[in-house]
Image (cartoon, rainbow, N blue to C red):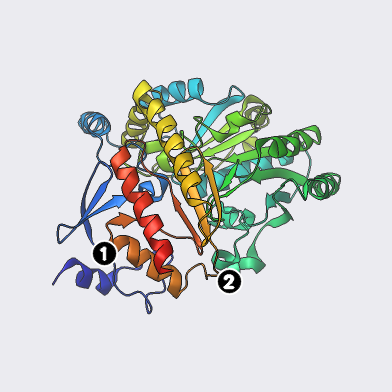
Amino acid sequence: MNFKERDRKHLWHPLTQHKLHPEHLAIVKAKGVWLYDEDGKRYLDGISSWYTCMYGHSHPQIISRVKQQLDILDQVVFSGFTHPPAIELSEKLMSALPSKMAKIFFSDNGSTSVDVAIKMSLQYYFNRGQKRKRIIAFDNAFHGDTFGAMSVSGLSVYNGPFEDFLLTVDRLQVPDDHNLPVVLSNFKTMLDTGEVAAFIYEPLVQGAAAMHMYRPDHLEMLIKMAQEADVLTIADEVMTGFGKTGKNFASEYMHTQPDVICLSKSLTAGVAPMALTCCSQQVYDAFYDDEISKGFFHGHTYSANPLACTAAIAGLDLLTSEEIQNNIKRIHKRHLEFEQRIKSHKKVKQTRVTGVIFALDLDIKMDRYGNLRDQLYAFFMEKGVFLRPLGNTIYTLPPFVITDGELDLIYKVMEECLEIV
């Protein structure tokens, strides 16, 4: 019995209707930008395995350090204890994060980092004697699948059955050159209620919303308005963090810094699950009190796992290296060149680039998880390139270590798919 058959017996996969898609490809090895299946066929990982393995798979510098840590300390409770990898990670991260950040709270994944941020925001005002229960989030946002993160997400394909059980969220259009006056007016109306605890946003790029990109100066206006209204601002950088937008963090494109930043995905370079919710000293101080009940009583069993912290330290060292920084610039330049070549194609509706993220919209109506999308996915895999179309949007977010030749392979299959759509 092969892996596919064994998989079908017991496993339930994410984002899958198993009656329509009963089989799953078994990946048995990964190295650099390549994934290998049980038959030995390889696939170029064009989305860095959901934006995690940004330094490629099994990077020797990361793996060797995690192996060393495994011999020293594998896991210890983080309530009442601390350990050197967590301390070193906090110090390194503070030198890379926007300067407003002062404290780090550990959890397990992107969704939990957002849940932590939401709970921090609600309790921040509760501890100050204010009852604020509303949160502002963008239309078509995606912040995760746990209940708090799901509440502030705006994609009904994921949230539909649960919408009666979610937190109170006010929806705001993503600003652009045409709707900006209306967005600013609506935002002010929401803030003026005095009931808003936080404004949460994905800075510059809404990943699950088909890599929708918007301008930093527009976002800056909203962040300023929120902070002037004494509303906390939460930058969900789970996807955008750690170099993907061209800067270490997308929040660096704005002068006004958020009060809270959520981080995960490439934080540990794809080696282990871990997330961080970083906040300003002002936020932390609202919990620092003689009253025990004003503390933040939230915790995860694997908070600050030493192996995950070690992987994150090694990843940060790579991110800040001259080689990776030059690679980020090179990939961005290649994306812009490809965009110039492809954007006038009759089947391309729109193209866009931010950092190492390239996206194009096909000029055709497609369901997000429909038959045509599935045919495109199968086409890419047959050609040996792993890409996951989001409806009619085809995008790539490749590992920083990808070569020009490997980038050319991604561009080639994107061009070829235009001829078969």
Question: In the rendered image, is residue 77 in sight?
Answer: no
In this rendered view, identify the residue nearer to me: 332 or 211: 332
In this rendered view, identify the residue nearer to me: 139 or 87: 139
Q: Quadrant of residue 67?
A: top left
| Residue at x 19% of width, y 66% of height | 3
In the image, taking residue 60 as reference, residue 284 lies left or right, namely right
Q: Amino acid at mark 2?
A: Pro
**Which image quarter is the N terminus in?**
bottom left
Question: In the rendered image, is residue 38 in sight?
Answer: yes
| Residue at x 77% of width, y 50% of height | 179
In this rendered view, identify the residue nearer to me: 285 or 389: 389
| Residue at x 39% of width, y 26% of height | 326
Q: Amino acid at mark 1?
A: Leu
Q: Is residue 187 above or below residue 22?
A: above
**Which image quarter is the C terminus in?**
bottom left
Q: Which residue is mark 2?
A: 161
Q: Which residue is mark 1?
A: 25
In the image, taking residue 303 as reference, residue 200 lies left or right, namely right
Nearer to us: label 2 or label 1 = 1
Q: Are marks 2 and 1 in contact (CB under 8 Å)?
A: no
Q: Is residue 53 above or below residue 87?
A: below
Numbered disc 2: secondary structure:
helix
Mark 2 vs 1, N-terminal side? 1
Q: Quadrant of residue 19?
A: bottom left
- Residue 133 placement (x, y as % from top left): 74, 50
Name the mark on residue 172: none
- Residue 336 placement (x, y as % from top left): 48, 40
- Residue 35 placement (x, y as % from top left): 25, 51
Crowding near pointer 1: few (<14 within 10 Å), some, many (20+)? few
- The residue most toward the bottom is 19
